[in-house]
């Protein structure tokens, strides 16, 4: 066997072993039990965040569904000038939680989690727990209120306090969908084994 062929086979084997990133979404995103069956590490992350921050699993899952559809390396779309010239991404949002650079940096500084990454489910859910606790403290939104937690997550604490979402019909619709999905996930999770 030639050296080139052996190197190629070795490269294929290494690539196959290293493809466990799971950046693609699980199948059947409308079924919480199916998601957790496919990605058992998700449940550990959700439960850990629930214990640490008090944010229910179904609220975390509904928010991640809306933000990234459970895609670890999700990014916002590109903006284009004249319809064809790429002008950069719409925002710095990245990962499962779609955390912005500045908010992520604030999270890292306050929690001391310097090695946390937005494309790692345990870190993304911990970020969401941290952020939603701030939302509860600043805006009085219960951790169980997926709809209003999502509005504050999207608009920021100050934007939520100002009611900036009231002029965004599309956002009000989406927040309602997050609330409904959280309820649906909650009922499904009660029936999971």
Image (cartoon, rainbow, N blue to C red):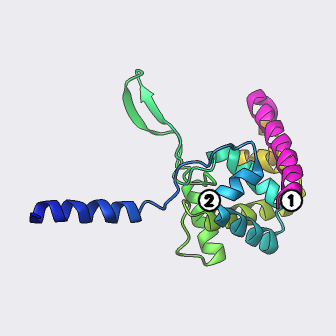
Q: Residue at x 40, y 35 (%)?
A: 87
Residue 73 visible in the snapshot: yes
Q: Secondary structure at mark 2?
A: helix
Q: Nearer the viewer, residue 145 or 10?
A: 10
Q: Residues within 10 Å of mark 1 (few under 14, many from 20)?
A: some
Pinpoint residue 91: horizontal percent, then vertical percent: 53, 44
Quarter holding residue 38? bottom right
Secondary structure, magenta segment, majority class:
helix
Magenta part of the chain:
166-193
Q: Find numbered disc 1 in the image and state the secondary structure of the residue it sits on.
A: loop
Q: State yes or no: residue 122 in magenta.
A: no
Residue at the front extreme of this rendering: 1
Please say whether residue 190 is one of the residues in the magenta stretch.
yes
Looking at this view, name the residue that lies furthest to the left: 2
Q: Quadrant of the C terminus?
A: bottom right
Measured in 3D between alpha carbons, the distance from the residue under mark 1 to the one under mark 2, in whole angstroms, is 19 Å
Q: Position of residue 174 (x, y in %)?
A: 76, 35
Relative to 8, 65 lies left or right: right
Which numbered tag is attached to residue 70? Answer: none
Disc ID at residue 103: 2
Q: Quadrant of residue 88?
A: top left
Picture residue at 49% right of the left edge, 60% below the top: 21
| Residue at mark 1 | 143
Nearest to the observer: residue 165 or residue 172:
172
């Amino acid at each position: 066997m030639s050296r080139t062929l052996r190197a190629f086979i070795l490269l294929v084997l290494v690539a196959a072993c290293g493809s466990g990133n799971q950046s693609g979404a699980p199948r059947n995103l409308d079924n919480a039990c199916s998601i957790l069956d496919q990605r058992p590490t998700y449940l550990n992350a959700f439960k850990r965040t629930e214990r640490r921050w008090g944010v229910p699993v179904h609220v975390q899952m509904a928010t991640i569904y809306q933000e990234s559809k459970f895609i670890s390396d999700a990014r916002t779309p590109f903006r284009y000038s004249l319809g064809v010239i790429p002008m950069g991404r719409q925002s710095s949002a990245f990962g499962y939680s779609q955390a912005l650079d500045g908010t992520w940096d604030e999270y890292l500084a306050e929690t001391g989690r310097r090695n946390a990454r937005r494309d790692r489910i345990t870190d993304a859910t911990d970020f969401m727990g941290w952020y939603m606790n701030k939302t509860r403290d600043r805006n009085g939104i219960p951790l169980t209120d997926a709809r209003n937690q999502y509005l504050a997550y999207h608009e920021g604490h100050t934007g939520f306090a100002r009611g900036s979402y009231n002029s965004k019909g599309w956002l009000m619709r989406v927040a309602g969908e997050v609330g409904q999905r959280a309820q649906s996930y909650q009922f499904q999770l009660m029936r999971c084994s």
